[in-house]
Image (cartoon, rainbow, N blue to C red):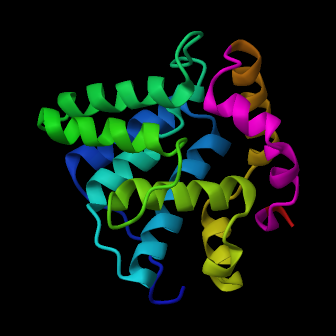
Amino acid sequence: MPASFSETFPETPAASAALAVATRFCSPALLNHSIRSYLWGAGYARAHGIGFDDELYYVSSLLHDIGLTETFDSHTVPFEEAGGRLAWVFGMSAGWSPERSARAEEIVVVHMRDPVAASEDPESHLLQVATSWDVSGQRPEEFPAEVRAAVLARHPRLGFGAEFLAAFEEQARRKPGCAAASSVTGGVGARIAANPLDA
């Protein structure tokens, strides 16, 4: 991989616990998406000189879509808010301060909100960039072909696009005012179908 990308992950008790949680409750495709989201964002940060909290970003990446899983899906709360609240509970259980736990919650929620600048909130910015790339192929110029191939070889998509779209459509059906519903009506299905990562 180019120097700006690395296959290394933070090695802390919270990071290991987040991986265990995501591995247990996420489907293989959703788990790989979460890991790729960390890798894309961390690589993007290094390429652009963006300082970020590696452990916080890793945990938030692994938990950002856990609200789409069967166990933690909410029938009333948007999936990113449900996932954010779980991230807060996770952080507190991991011994983080309330403030750090709240940051994990914020990052998870903000990944489905309007874009934020790296100077304002680097971890949320990175997750927005990474997930928009992995889901719908935005900013392809930031991720060279050799980087894409290396990441996908280790963490393949496993039909992620179709699974993710079905989950968003189900969220939209049950919670028509949520951000996932706006994404569906805004044409996310076409963007997923055109994603160069699935070419």
Name the residue rendered at 49%, 38% in the picture: 23
> Residue 35 versus residue 168: which sits nearer the camera?
168
From the image, give the main secondary structure of the stretch colored magenta.
helix
Q: Indicate the quadrant where residue 129 lies.
A: bottom right
In the rendered image, the vertical position of residue 133 relative to residue 44, given as above or below: above
> Residue 120 versus residue 62: which sits nearer the camera?
120
Q: Which residues are magenta?
A: 175-197
> Residue 159 versus residue 143: which sits nearer the camera?
143
**Numbered circles on residues, count:** 0
In the rendered image, the vertical position of residue 64 relative to residue 118, given as above or below: above
From where the camera sits, is residue 36 visible? no
The verdict on residue 179 being magenta is yes
The verdict on residue 60 being magenta is no
Q: Outermost residue toward the top?
A: 75
Left or right of 151, for residue 91 = left
Left or right of 183, for residue 33 = left
Name the residue rendered at 22%, 53% in the picture: 12
> Where residue 123 sits in the image (x, y, percent)?
36, 57
In the rendered image, the vertical position of residue 175 relative to residue 87, given as above or below: above
> Where residue 133 sits in the image (x, y, percent)?
65, 62
Q: Indicate the quadrant where residue 131 lies.
A: bottom right
Q: Indicate the quadrant where residue 178 lies.
A: top right
In the rendered view of the protein, which quadrant contains the C terminus?
Answer: bottom right
Name the residue rendered at 41%, 33% in the picture: 21
> Where residue 154 sits in the image (x, y, percent)?
61, 65
From where the camera sits, is residue 71 visible? yes
> Where residue 124 sits in the image (x, y, percent)?
41, 53
